[in-house]
Image (cartoon, rainbow, N blue to C red):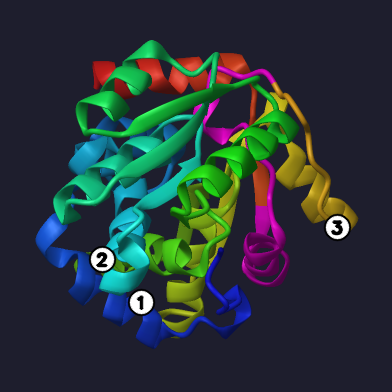
Amino acid sequence: MESVVVAPDLTIDHVLQARERINPHIHNTPILTSAYLNERIGAELFFKCENFQKAGAFKVRGACNSVFGLTDEDAVSGVATHSSGNHALSLSYAAGRRGIPCHVVMPKTAPQAKKDAVLGYGGLITECEPSTSSREAVFAEVQAKTGAEFVHPYNDPRVIAGQATCSAEMLESVEGLDTIVAPIGGGGMISGTCLTVSNLAPHIEVFAAEPLQADDAARSFRSGRIIADDAPVTVADGLKVPLKENTWHFVSHYVADVLTATEEEIIDAMRITWQR
C-alpha cells in the first residue's frame, strides 16, 4: 500500500529527515555552468547534474528515502513498483543496499540498457504492454503475489520528500536564484522542488518542462484538472507517465507555468549539452 500520508501534509521537516536518511547512499551532485549557454540564452544558468547521481538519475533520492524509511517488519517482503526505467533502477539499487528484494513491472518497450541495469542491481522484472493501464494491471498481480511494499515512482509522499532534497542542495549552493526549471513526467521531482522552494525560497518561480508530444501536464495545468495520455510517443522516454493526485496538488498550487519542447528541440539540446 502507498503511504497514508498525503502530499499536501508534507512539510520541510520531511525533506530534512529525508536528507539525513539518504545521505550515506547518494551523491550531492555537482552544479555546472556554461558560458556558451549563458550567452545563447541571455541568462546565468546553473545545472544540477543528477546524471552523475548514484544509479544515474535523481530518482535514487526518493527510492532511498522510501526503502530506508521502512520498518524491518514492512521491509521483510521487499518493495515493488512499476517504472519505465529510472525509478526501477533506483529502487533496485536502494533495495540492494538494504538487502531486500525489489519487484519491478516494466514496459516491453523500455530501453534494454535500463532493463539490464535493473537486473544488474538485483531487480526482478515482470514486463507489461507500453501503456499506463497495462502497467497498473500487471503490477496489481505482482504485488498480490509477493506482498511487497508498493513504492510508487512519483505519487508516493516518501518519494516526493526524497526528490525535494535535490533542490534543497541547490539552494544551499547557489545564491540569487530567481527561477528553477525542472522536468515533469509524473511530477515527483517538480513536486519536491515546489515543496522545498515554497518553504525555503518562496520568491523563486518554479517552471515545469516536458515534451510537446507528451504534454499532458501542460494541458492539465491549463484546464485545471488532470488530463492523461495513455501511450504518448517521445524520445524523452522517462517523461511519458501521467500526473497523479499528490503531484497534481503541487503542480496546480505552486508551478508558475508548464513549458513544452518539440522532439527536435529536445534532441538539439541534448546535442549541445554533450558537445559543450
Q: Earlier in the sequence, mark 3 or mark 2?
A: 2
Q: Is residue 232 above or below residue 26?
A: above
Q: What secondary structure is found at the residue carrying circle 1?
A: helix
- Residue 239's label in the rendered image is none
Q: Residue 130's quadrant in the figure?
A: top right
For residue 225, the mark is 3
Residue 221: percent from the left, percent from the top?
Answer: 78, 54
Horizontal side of residue 68 vs 159, given as left or right: left
- In the rendered image, the residue lying farthest to the right is 223
158 lies left or right of 212: left
Can residue 26 be seen here? no
Pointer 1 residue: 15
Question: Which residue: 50% across, 27% down?
Answer: 106
Furthest-left residue in this view: 24
Tag 2 secondary structure: helix
Circle 3 crowding by C-alpha within 10 Å: few under 14, some 14–19, many from 20 = some
- The percent coordinates of residue 157 (x first, y second) are 51, 69
Q: Which residue is mark 2?
A: 68
Which residue appears at 24% of the width and 72% of the height? 19
Query: Amino acid type of disc 3?
Result: Arg
Q: Can residue 197 be seen by looking at this rendering?
A: yes
In the image, which residues are magenta?
233-257
How far across and down, in percent of the image, does residue 188 sit?
51, 55
Quarter placement of the N terminus? bottom right
User: Quick check: marks 1 and 3 in contact, CB under 8 Å?
Assistant: no
Amino acid identity at mark 2: Phe
